[in-house]
Image: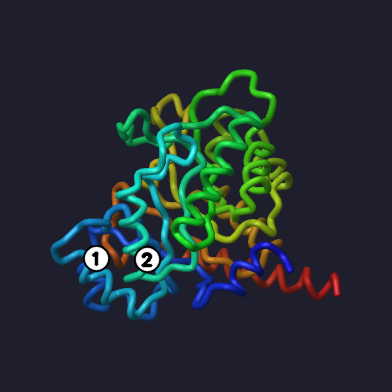
Amino acid sequence: MSFRAGITARASGVPTGVGLGLRGAFLAEVDRGAADGRVPFWEISPDNYVARGGARPARLARIAERFPILSHGLSLSLGGLDPLDAEFMAGLRGFFERVPAPWHSDHLCFSGHDGKMLHDLLPLPWTTASAKRVAARVREVSQRLERPMLVENISYYLPLGCAPLDEAAFVVEVLERADCGLLLDVNNVFVNATNHGFDPLEWLTQIPLDRVVQLHIAGHEFWDDERRDLIIDTHGAPVRREVDELLAWVVERTGPLPVLLERDENIPPLAELLAERDRVDAVYQAALVRHAARAQGAA
């Protein structure tokens, strides 16, 4: 049994297909039923709900009665040096008691130091020492939350010097040492490959696809529209064709997965976002057809 199959077998109600991030811009519309029957799941960041009152938690509870919910965090700073925040971890556990999710994910980065949040996803040194430290942290989070953990590959904009590992090898070492899953962001792979001059497909061939439990896909924008020499992972534009192709390449080899279409900037009206979801879903469904053909050919 693959790692992915083991996680999904132990969890209940694991969705597949192309879902969306549940954003405040359209939370009330979704609560009223505007997306019923159109989205297989919603992904939320519990960081925005822990220790928060008002209407938002009640709306999420009603939505969770009708849709599967996946959980994706922003604040754990898995590569950081500070101890895990005990109060925040307790809040996360309490959140999952109210809104069950089959796993929790966060980024393979550091985002805080000395008790201060930097509000960015900053890259880690690609070393075995760093991989060991992050893996221990991932295992600790999984134990304290009593659910599997996934780590997400990030986009980065500056080279990290002469590290002994490359990014893909570092990701693999963390996955194996932590015995965790990968939330594979194919847009981040494309952004890094374009900015730093490597082949995204070659990067993907180094990743153990049986550890890919979820996918992220998003749009990006140029830092300078005239020079067009650096792209930024803004989640603020439609998904580009090249990123569609990476999504399809992965799904053709993994089969059904939950795929999250991210939109965090320039959020369009919900109807427009649902249309983009449908377009990405057509790419996903075509890849599933090819996956079935590959499986039949191998039988």
Q: Quadrant of the N terminus?
A: bottom right
Residue type at numbered disc 2: Phe
Residue 112 horizontal/vertical position (percent):
37, 33
Q: Tell me, yes or no, whether the two marked residues, 1 and 2, touch with CB atoms within 8 Å.
A: no
Residue 177 horizontal/vertical position (percent):
66, 45
The answer to which of marks 1 and 2 sits earlier in the sequence is 1
Nearer to the camera, 250 or 77: 77
Nearest to the eye among marks 1 and 2: give it.
2
Q: Quadrant of the C terminus?
A: bottom right
Residue occupying image coordinates x 52% and y 70%: 17
Residue 200 horizontal/vertical position (percent):
65, 41
How many residues crowd around disc 2 within 10 Å: few (fewer than 14), some, or many (20 or more)? some
Residue occupying image coordinates x 22% and y 77%: 32
Residue type at numbered disc 1: Leu
Relative placement, left or right, of 187 versus 90 is right
Relative placement, left or right, of 131 versus 122 is right
Rounded to the nearest angstrom, the CA distance separating label 1 from label 2 is: 19 Å
Residue occupying image coordinates x 46% and y 29%: 228
Residue 285, by quadrant, is bottom right
* Label ID, residue 215: none
Reading the image, the residue beneath label 1 is 27
Residue occupying image coordinates x 59% and y 71%: 8
Residue 47 horizontal/vertical position (percent):
31, 52
Q: Helix, strand, or loop for circle 2?
A: helix
The residue most toward the top is 162
Relative placement, left or right, of 285 versus 25 is right
Reading the image, the residue beneath label 2 is 96
Nearer to the camera, 113 or 282: 113
Q: Helix, strand, or loop for circle 1?
A: helix
How many residues crowd around disc 1 within 10 Å: few (fewer than 14), some, or many (20 or more)? some
Nearer to the camera, 171 or 228: 171
